[in-house]
């Protein structure tokens, strides 16, 4: 049987290590030219397949592909675009299969979070029905760390490291000025429904920092929160607050709700930090500074976790290997074998059990008062932020990141309107 091509796409918010997964996919595919002729990438994610904007990765040198491992963001472009259900918009799924047929694509590697797992699962189902089987493999990625079954998600370890280190450094700054100036520092982190990233900020407790953390899993109690902050300032002279963007009132309204929606229909968040900071100022009178980590936390390749980079590459590699073994409609996973010493291996999960399932932070990881983390949570987190994987730097002192050629593949079908 002649070799088929593969299609790879990046989905949703990018991370500092998603390109390491792309590197794992492409390098591994290149080692099997008898089975995978070429890897085409979607320009701006799955949209690239629908509009037939395919990128020919064979035009990239081995050195350029290898450099993806230390380059942040999405080298091929990503996009927040969730395909509707098969019943609601079958034409888009049929279009994907038509593109795959036209370009002899027999492998589909979709690198993303829960929504992309759902798309990958549906493509695997429809391709069989349409008589053109495509092996659909989901490569996990999400800074929110909320995919089920896998112990952790590529992208999370590096965000956790960045937030833990940045919170520690900023807290040192506040501590040095607290006697006569700022006493409160608030940092807002990502995490709509799961507080994994906020938990990473809470690690600074182990380094003597008085910290109060607001998780999406715990309903916000203003009176209790202000009392906790006031107590820490009176004891230590200052306090750091880590607030998840998903922190919410008892009625479910987000502290950071803006009244707008993103392309997935999710509430547009951003602004919990100033809400919390001004709340403290109004009630307690303490001078504050606040920051929103936003893109910085997920783009910070210069401070990536060594274990995160290694796992991101390994899962991309495993996705190809499992496809070549004949696997379909699965996601390679990280299996934690032990935390001390940290040991992990590659497993797999059926997409039917991954799609549209969110993994929240277990309540036993949150301290009894709701404002901190337990020893069990620390045991889980520390291995994920260990190790450094610095990018190379050029003569000007800037990271030496790669920008690909992104040469297009000749189109074969008519235009398609989204």
Image: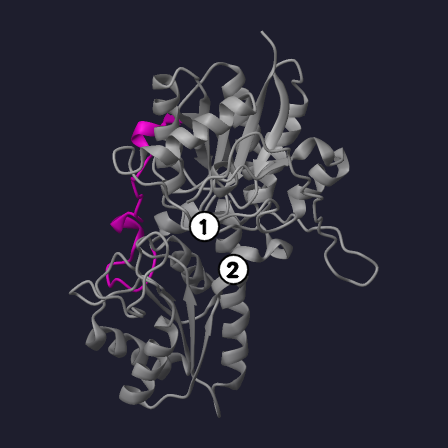
Q: Is residue 13 above or below residue 372?
A: above
- Which residue does the image show at 48% across and 42% down from the upper left? 47
Q: Residue furthest right?
A: 395
The secondary element bearing badge 1 is classed as loop
The residue to which callout 2 is attached is 297
Q: Position of residue 5 (x, y in %)?
A: 59, 23
Q: Which residues are magenta?
A: 349-373
Q: Quadrant of the N terminus?
A: top right
The secondary element bearing badge 2 is classed as helix
Q: Position of residue 186 (x, y in %)?
A: 41, 74
The reply to whether residue 332 is visible in this rendering is no
Q: Quadrant of residue 29?
A: top right
328 drawn magenta: no
The residue to which callout 1 is attached is 143
Q: Residue furthest left?
A: 251
Q: Position of residue 351 (x, y in %)?
A: 35, 29
Q: Are marks 1 and 2 in contact (CB under 8 Å)?
A: yes
Depth order, front residue of 271/250: 271
Q: Position of residue 404 (x, y in %)?
A: 70, 45
Q: Is residue 344 above or below residue 115?
A: above
Q: Is residue 212 above or below residue 418?
A: below
Q: Residue furthest top?
A: 1
Q: Quadrant of the C terminus?
A: top left
């Amino acid at each position: 049987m002649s070799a088929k091509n593969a299609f790879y796409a990046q989905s949703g918010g990018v991370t500092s290590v998603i390109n390491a997964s792309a590197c794992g996919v492409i390098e591994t595919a290149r080692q099997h030219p008898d089975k995978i002729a070429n890897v085409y990438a979607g320009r701006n994610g799955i949209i690239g397949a629908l509009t037939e904007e395919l990128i020919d990765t064979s035009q990239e040198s081995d050195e350029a592909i290898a450099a993806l491992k230390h380059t942040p963001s999405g080298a091929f472009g990503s996009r927040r675009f969730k395909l509707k259900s098969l019943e609601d918009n079958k034409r888009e799924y049929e279009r994907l299969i038509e593109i795959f047929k036209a370009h002899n694509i027999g492998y589909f590697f979709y690198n993303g979070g829960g929504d992309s797992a759902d798309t990958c699962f549906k493509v695997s189902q429809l391709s069989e029905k349409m008589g053109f089987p495509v092996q659909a493999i989901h490569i996990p990625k999400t800074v929110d760390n909320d995919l089920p079954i896998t112990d952790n998600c590529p992208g999370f370890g590096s965000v956790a490291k960045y937030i833990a280190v940045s919170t520690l450094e900023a807290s040192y700054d506040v501590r040095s000025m607290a006697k006569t100036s700022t006493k409160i520092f608030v940092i807002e982190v990502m995490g709509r429904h799961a507080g994994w990233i906020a938990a990473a900020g809470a690690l600074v407790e182990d380094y003597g920092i008085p910290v109060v953390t607001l998780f999406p899993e715990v309903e916000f109690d203003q009176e209790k929160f202000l009392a906790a902050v006031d107590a820490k300032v009176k004891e230590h002279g200052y306090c750091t607050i880590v607030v998840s963007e998903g922190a919410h009132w008892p009625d479910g309204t987000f502290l950071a709700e803006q009244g707008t929606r993103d392309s997935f229909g999710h509430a547009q968040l951003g602004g919990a930090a100033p809400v919390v900071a001004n709340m403290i100022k109004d009630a307690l009178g303490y001078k504050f500074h606040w920051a929103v980590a936003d893109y910085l936390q997920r783009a910070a390749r210069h401070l990536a976790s060594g274990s995160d980079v290694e796992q991101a590459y390994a899962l991309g590699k495993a996705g190809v290997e499992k496809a070549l073994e004949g696997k379909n409609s699965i996601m390679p996973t990280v299996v934690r074998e032990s935390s001390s010493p940290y040991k992990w291996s590659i497993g797999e999960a059926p997409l039917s059990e991954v799609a549209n399932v969110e993994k929240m932070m277990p309540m036993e990881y949150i301290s009894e008062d709701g404002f901190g983390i337990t020893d069990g949570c620390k045991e889980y987190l520390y291995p994920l932020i260990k190790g450094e994987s610095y990018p190379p730097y050029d003569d000007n002192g800037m990271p030496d990141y790669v920008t690909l050629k992104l040469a297009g593949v000749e189109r074969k079908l008519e235009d398609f309107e989204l």
